Amino acid sequence: MMKRSSILALFCIVFCFSCGSKAPAPSGSPTGTNPTPNASAASPGSALITQVVLASRLTLFHHPVEVVNQFPTANGAINAVITIANAPPNSHVRGVFTDAGSGKQVNDFNITTEGSQHVGNIWKYPALPVGRYKLDVYLNGTLERSVDFQVTSDATPAPPPPTPGTIGNCAPVHSELQPAGDFGTVGLSIALGVDAQGKATGVGRIFKPDTAILYAIAKIEKTPSATRFGVRWYATDIGGVEPCDTEIADYETTVPAGSAGAYAGTRTPNGEPWPEGIYRAELYLNGTRTLVTDFGICAGPCKFKVPLAWTLP
């Protein structure tokens, strides 16, 4: 049997609800925690896998490049991209590769995840016999999807990774905002951390590529009833490393009446550096986009024009 591979979820999602009790400082666990006992951590609806594809290459944020069903016999890489929705914390995705002819398992992988996002696994192998194969994908122990593929002697090699280009070639994004109803938000900040009281630390709009975790922290006028709280993260323009306006991940949960704030954290896969460029976080209350905050990742002086608002205190 080939060596087992295991990767963590693409994003760390952590929520803190101000409901009269102190929340402990976040641990930074990639699988997330729910620090307040009376706050629901489960996503609305049932967890499901909406799509599984195989590709010759993945982008940094696990988007497929050149979806294929044939791979080479020597020095190959099979990139599995699994799209999952409404997954509660610590949801388990397992993939099993088998030789369709013999029924023998040849590799597997395990991913812990939550929310709605792409998760990916890269299986690099020195050699595989020509033949038909299958990938079965399980969600929390239940078979959800199967994908057939072939290993052939004339399969096209994987394309090289893209070279970062000029930041600023993407069209501007105009995010229309709507009121959330009879309550609203005071602000949405991007920060390096959250303290034990759920307050932002290291608030800013420009961060370094080696930043471990970034948090989107929302201040909400006290909600009169249970409210759907969601955050979506986007790579708006990162110089062609990802397509323009790529959604990185989204997460939604229900917060109880009286909630006054929440935060969600995210980081890159496997702790890799953030690509330089422009990003944004969008806040949704009851499915309505109510606030958007743009931010940048810069290794030194930014390679794009920095809006004046980003430099103000």
Image: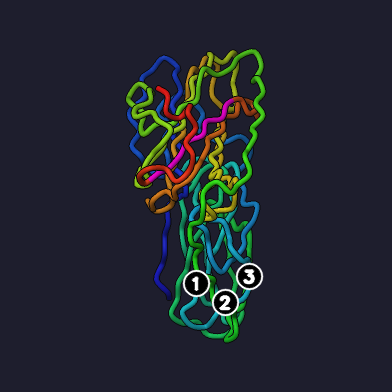
List x then y, in percent, for residue 194.
36, 28
Query: In the drawing, does residue 192 fall left or right of residue 140?
Result: left
Q: Name the residue under label 2.
A: 71
The C terminus appears in which quarter of the rendering?
A: top left
Contact check, label 3 and label 2, Cβ < 8 Å: yes
Of the image marks 3 and 1, the number of the one nearer the N terminus: 3
Q: Identity of the amino acid at label 2?
A: Phe
Residue 236 lies, with reference to residue 179, above or below; the image says below
Q: Identity of the amino acid at label 1?
A: Ala
Q: Identity of the amino acid at label 3?
A: Val
Q: Does the magenta stretch include residue 257?
A: no
List x then y, in percent, for residue 21.
38, 17
Q: Can residue 64 be seen in this view?
A: yes
How many numbered circles does the render carry? 3
273 or 170: which is nearer to us? 170
* Residue at image location 54% in from the left, 20% down from the top: 256
Q: Mark 1 points at which residue?
A: 77
The secondary structure making up most of the magenta span is: strand
Quadrant assignment, res 227: top right
Region in magenta:
291-298
List x then y, in percent, for residue 172.
62, 40
List x then y, in percent, for residue 231.
54, 34
253 or 283: which is nearer to us? 283
Q: Can residue 212 be seen in this view?
A: no
Q: Indicate which disc residue 68 carries.
A: 3
Quadrant assignment, res 300: top left
- Secondary structure under tag 3 reads loop
Q: Is residue 293 magenta?
A: yes
* Residue at image location 56% in from the left, 40% down from the top: 250
Spatial separation of the CA atoms under disc 3 and disc 2: 8 Å
Report crowding for label 2: few under 14, some 14 to 19, many 20 or more residues within 10 A (C-alpha).
many
